[in-house]
Amino acid sequence: MQANTRRGFADARFAGEPASYTEDAGTPSRSSTRAAALRLRVRSWNDAQVSAPPTASELHGSARPGAPLRGVLSMLASVLLLTLSDALTKLLSTGYPPGQIICMRSLIVIGFVLVLSTPRRRWTGLRIRSPGAHFTRGVFACAGSFLFVLAISHVPLANAMSIGFAGPLLITALAGPMLGERIGWRRWCAVLVGFLGVLVILRPGAQGFHWAAMLLLAGTWFGSLRDIVTRRISATESSSSLLLTTNLSMVGFGLLSLLQGWNMPNPLDAVWLALCGVLIGAGHYLQIEAFHHAEAGTVVPFRYTALLWAMLMGWLVFGDVPDASMLGGASLVIASGLFILYRERRVGGAPRPPGGPRLRIPGYRWDDTQ
């Protein structure tokens, strides 16, 4: 029996080994849950699925002492590393084309995945079962990354981060018509409030409006489509295979920009480009670890600390000072995202009704029994 999926923030959640159940009681046996916990820990990187993990309380009946704290610390470290990579990307985007940046940092992430897969020869975690779905997800990921890198040089880092927080709102809005999930009126109201916050940040028609902010919003849209695909294929595809194929897609996409010409990086910029890839790989790994040690509801709110780091880095490195509209709009977006997370944990994520709308994913066969 597969572990229950906690909805929301689909691209950042990972599930482990499903617990076995006794036939007479319908509850996990003590030996099977211990074995499941051991298997979950051993395959923490390669075989984790992109959905919610069974927590220690689900496997043992009560959480291990210190496990939630370790999950929170892992999430905080992940957010810091990923925000640092965004700041480096913003620095590099003024001197190098987006395709070059995406390609070079993705090569580092691919090496990161392969290195982590080698020690125990966990190559089975890289198995691809739905090539078409991987390709579709890779296209969405490439589009989102390209728009982000293209726009980040023109928009303050904190503003870019705030617009990116609209991702969970878009996922919730898309999950109804594209996946057939039941979305209650409370979550729809939260989505509308969150989009109002995005408008406050963008300030369309105002003097402070910049066209690049619309590129960031479009990039967030593609990121949400990527996560919708992830939500559907996470039961059969491992996180390491998704990370590998996505970055392979980005390398291929980046190489296309060679036709427009690349700039030869100087030694210092080459270090920054390599460090950017290392930060992304380490950040995603720590995010997986966070969801292995604590429930989604415990660690997800700490993702919003990225805004604090973005404001600090924007001020220290780029001289950007957040204004009232950015702070007010970001508050609305964050509050909406937290409320949606609360409601999804409360209702448990209503299942898709049989025969409901289906997202057409090449290479993926739908199964109503999942």
Image: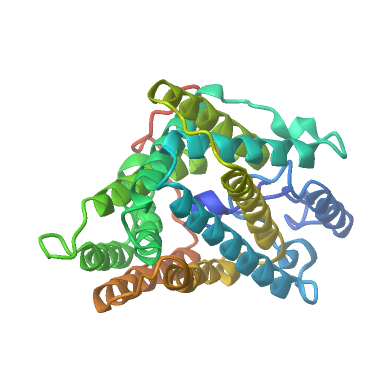
- Whether residue 237 is visible to the viewer of this picture, yes or no, is no
The correct choice, above or below, for 342 with respect to 144 in the image is below
Give the residue at x 65% y 60%. 291
Q: Position of residue 332 (x, y in %)?
A: 31, 73
With 360 as the anchor, is 345 left or right in this view? Answer: right
Work out which residue is located at the far left of the displayed protein and give it: 205
The correct choice, above or below, for 223 with respect to 29 in the image is above
- Front one among 213 and 68: 213
Q: Position of residue 198 (x, y in %)?
A: 26, 63
Total tally of numbered discs in the picture: 0
- Front one among 234 and 274: 274
Q: Position of residue 88 (x, y in %)?
A: 52, 54
Give the residue at x 37% y 64%. 162
The correct choice, above or below, for 110 with respect to 45 in the image is above
Q: Position of residue 67 (x, y in %)?
A: 75, 71
- Front one among 83 and 299: 83
